[in-house]
Image: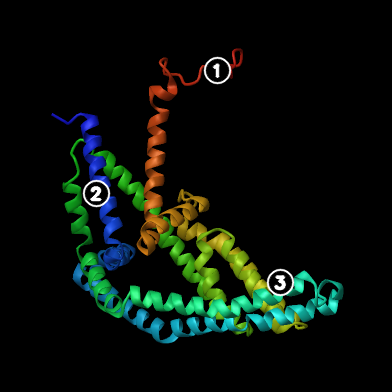
Amino acid sequence: MALPVRTQLKYWGIATGIFVLVLWFLGDVILPFVLGGAIAYLLDPVADWLERKGLSRALSVAIITVGSTIVFVLSILLVIPTLIEQAINLFQVAPEAAAKMQVFLTERFPDLVNENSTLRKSLESIGQTIQDKGAQFIETVVSSAASLVNIIVLMVIVPVVAVYMLYDWDHMVAEIDKLLPRDHAPVIRRLAREMDATIASFIRGMGTVCLVLGSYYAIALMLVGLQFGLVVGAFAGLVTFIPYLGAIIGGALAIGLGLFQFWGDWVSIGLVAGIFVVGQMVEGNILTPKLVGSSVGLHPVWLLFALSVFGALFGFVGMLVAVPLAAAIGVLVRFGAENYMDSKLYQGLNGQGPAETEDEPAAIE
């Protein structure tokens, strides 16, 4: 005989509370396992595809591991140091950019930037603050990340966890399925499929979009000759998961730098602007429809809220799990709304919904 609903809710509520407390107290301790699990989840479709081509699971995982290792090592040796160096240099040259802006405004709007004007003082203050705090901020972030995710975690624990989880992924899913309460297993499986579809569409699809656009912006800006093109392109690609924000921020930053660097060379400035116009056209008409789809169900505001809340509660680990948890919560909310629409609480005792007709509109008090 099944347990009463109230008793089931009590038990599952206790289990959820214990899980949240464990996540709260362990915090950064579980970071390598969260990262390893995320990597395994992202790469599982590749392993499944290789299996469908006739390879064994072990050989598929081995091929993925070797390929990922090569990409990781090349990134560490070629891309990341240059990216960090350009980011620090960008903050260091900010006062020079502010000075050029003052010259530009002085030549064209002399009354706005006299020595005692508020605008001039603000520009000088902003430039000095960025120089003083910007490089220090970047260096602090890098050193904090290095202490948080130390060399052992990066080079040993995370890859080992990812490889083992990737190898046993299907087996783990089958074992979890066996533990589902029999009365609710069909509903849980349905919700799990919807969560997986949402998370896969967004994280895998949007992650690919961010990578493609970031690479395109960085390479194109460097080919045009824009200083700091790599860091600007990488940043624009990173925030592409929020619609239009990546193009607006990245485009404004790139065009602003282009104005200082190429002033008078309107062809180069037009090329910088055109890079982001083309990027947005390709992203909106090709990449996002093909890789993400139109039914992800994750609103940008909901994503920002989830990142803020989980980041404040659980730190860096919370930010890592914010998107999948936001997707899961969104699926549960839609499921609850569907059941509410089918319930007597919504439909009323007659089961016909709100008592409203053309002749007798519902009264509003």
Residue 173 picture quarter: bottom left
Type of amino acid under label 3: Ser
Asked if residue 191 is positioned above or below residue 1 in the image, the reply reads: below
| Residue 269 point in image, percent of width and height | 71, 78
Question: Which is more foreground, mark 1 or mark 3?
Answer: 3
Task: Classify residue 15 as left or right of residue 353.
Answer: left
Location of the C terminus (image quadrant): top right
Q: Which residue is mark 2?
A: 18
Can you tell which of label 2 and label 3 is closer to the viewer? 3
Q: Circle 3 is placed at which residue position?
A: 122
Three-letter amino acid code at the position of disc 1? Glu
The vertical placement of 206 against 75, above or below, is above
Instruction: Assess disc 1: are there few (<14), some (14-19) or many (≥20) residues with their C-alpha within 10 Å of its C-alpha.
Output: few
N-terminal of the pair, mark 2 or mark 1, is 2
Give the residue drawn at x 25%, y 77%: 156
Residue at the (23%, 61%) spot, across then down: 169
Q: Position of residue 338 (x, y in %)?
A: 40, 34
Ranked by sequence position, the earlier of labels 1 and 3 is 3
Q: Nearer the viewer, residue 168 or 3?
A: 3
The local crowd at label 2, few if under 14, some if 14 to 19, many if 20 or more residues have their Cα within 10 Å, is few
The label number, if any, that marks residue 284 in the structure image: none
63 with respect to 284 (left or right): left
Inter-mark Cα distance, 2 to 3: 51 Å
Kindly tell me whether residue 60 is visible in this rendering.
no
- Identify the element where label 2 is drawn: helix
**In which quadrant of the rendered view does residue 126 lie?**
bottom right
Residue 195 lies left or right of residue 293; in this view the side is left
Which amino acid type corresponds to the residue marked 2 in the rendered image?
A: Ile
The residue that mark 1 highlights is 356
